[in-house]
Image (cartoon, rainbow, N blue to C red):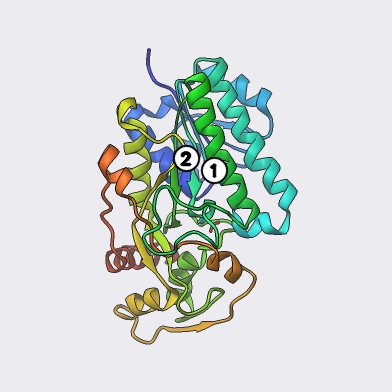
């Protein structure tokens, strides 16, 4: 039976790039993009697109049936900063949409599910440096609580119903193709835009706030490697720690200054500082490396070079 992939949240930061990569792998017609709003023109013009509100399980089931979907990548989420402003809505979206997907896999022909967790599943009592795969997890944000609970539900559906669900705890993701929406790590994308547009940037996170981050090509590669790994290699059915680069705002500024020496960084921390302070600084991803062969490629300077070169063209 041929694989047909449904991507929920195809208009988002990860979805935009993931759909294009999956279409290269599976063929354009076999990757159905979906979102509540239209996606990037590259996504809209290269294959099928369906309008789906991820809270609507019946609509999701209709699309799964229409295309005989065998894999779902569920990327819809309300991120940390926005969910703090509307806790109940954040919880409802993040949890209900996950249940719809897990139930479709439990009851129907969907064979494999991908669902992203996040470094937000950890909390202020978690060790900040070399954060282990298994450790104290007491998230203090709505988004983090939903990710922690979601991980346990994924594991439950795997062990109770045999649902082949796979997950990664994403660090902050940085990309030039698509912008993030409402996260605490978003400064690490904005800073590149402002460096080129204004030559200066005011960071909403303070000096010294070191967080785990990753360049999007690495994140896409990790996601697909996990999904393509033989099932017996995927030993964790909660979610895998994944590390790329860890840096603070001043480290990105120093990396940008190698290309734009006059670039200036200032600080004006807001409510997102407390969220960032509750998250780890550096993640231990030994389990991902051992179980399914993960290795990151981009360091900070290589990412900066690529971001600036591509954004220069994009911004004209
Ligand atoms: C956020 O900042 O909310 C996200 C995340 C780390 O999951 N980028």
Along the horizontal axis of the image, is 204 left or right of 310?
right
Residue 56, picture quadrant: top right
Queried on whether the Cβ of the residue with tag 2 lies below 8 angstroms from ligand 1, the answer reads no
- The location of residue 174, given as percent across then percent down, is 42, 59
Q: Secondary structure at mark 2?
A: helix
In-front residue for pair 91/280: 280
Along the horizontal axis of the image, is 178 left or right of 294?
right
Residue 9, picture quadrant: top right
Residue 129 numbered tag: none
Along the horizontal axis of the image, is 103 left or right of 84?
left
- The location of residue 313, given as percent across then percent down, is 37, 63
- The location of residue 226, given as percent across then percent down, is 35, 36
The quarter in which the N terminus is drawn is top left
Q: Secondary structure at mark 1?
A: loop
Mark 1 and mark 2 in contact (Cβ < 8 Å)? yes
Which residue position holds label 2? 43
Tally of numbered discs: 2
Residue 245, picture quadrant: bottom left
Q: Residue furthest bottom?
A: 262
Judge whether residue 51 can be spotted in this image: no
Residue at 48 percent of width and 24 percent of height: 159
Along the horizontal axis of the image, is 315 left or right of 87?
left
Q: Is residue 71 above or below residue 108?
A: below
Structural crowding at the residue carrying mark 2, measured as other residues with C-alpha within 10 Å and reported as few (<14), some (14–19) or many (≥20): many
Residue at 47 percent of width and 80 percent of height: 207
Queried on whether the Cβ of the residue with tag 1 lies below 8 angstroms from ligand 1, the answer reads no
The alpha-carbon separation of the residues under discs 2 and 1 comes to 6 Å
Structural crowding at the residue carrying mark 1, measured as other residues with C-alpha within 10 Å and reported as few (<14), some (14–19) or many (≥20): many
Which residue position holds label 1? 39
- The location of residue 122, given as percent across then percent down, is 52, 54
Residue at 42 percent of width and 73 percent of height: 248
């Amino acid at each position: 039976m041929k694989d047909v992939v449904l991507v929920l949240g195809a208009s988002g930061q990860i979805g935009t790039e993931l759909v294009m990569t999956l279409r290269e792998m599976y063929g354009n017609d076999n990757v159905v993009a979906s979102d509540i709003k239209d996606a990037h023109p590259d996504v809209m013009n290269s294959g099928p697109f369906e309008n789906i509100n991820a809270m609507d399980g019946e609509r999701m089931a209709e699309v799964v049936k229409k295309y005989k979907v065998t894999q779902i990548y569920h990327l819809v989420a309300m991120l940390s900063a926005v969910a703090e402003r509307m806790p109940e809505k954040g919880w409802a979206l993040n949890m209900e949409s996950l249940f719809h997907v897990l139930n479709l896999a439990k009851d129907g022909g969907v064979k494999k599910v991908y669902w992203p967790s996040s470094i937000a599943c950890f909390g202020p009592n978690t060790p900040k440096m070399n954060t282990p795969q298994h450790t104290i997890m007491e998230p203090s944000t709505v988004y983090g609580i939903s990710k922690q609970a979601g991980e346990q539900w994924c594991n439950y559906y795997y062990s109770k119903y045999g649902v082949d669900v796979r997950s990664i705890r994403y660090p902050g993701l940085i990309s030039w193709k698509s912008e993030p929406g409402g996260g605490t790590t978003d400064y690490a994308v904005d800073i590149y835009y402002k460096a080129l547009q204004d030559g200066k940037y005011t960071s909403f996170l303070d000096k010294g706030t070191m967080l785990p981050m990753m360049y999007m090509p690495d994140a896409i590669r990790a996601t697909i490697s996990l999904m393509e790994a033989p099932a017996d290699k995927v030993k964790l059915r909660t979610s895998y720690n994944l590390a790329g680069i860890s840096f603070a705002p001043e480290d990105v500024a120093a990396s940008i200054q190698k290309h734009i020496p006059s670039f200036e960084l200032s600080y004006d921390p807001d409510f997102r500082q407390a969220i960032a302070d509750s998250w780890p600084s550096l993640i231990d991803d030994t389990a991902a490396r051992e179980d399914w062969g993960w290795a990151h490629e981009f360091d900070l300077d290589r990412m900066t070079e690529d971001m600036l070169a591509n954004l220069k063209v994009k911004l004209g």
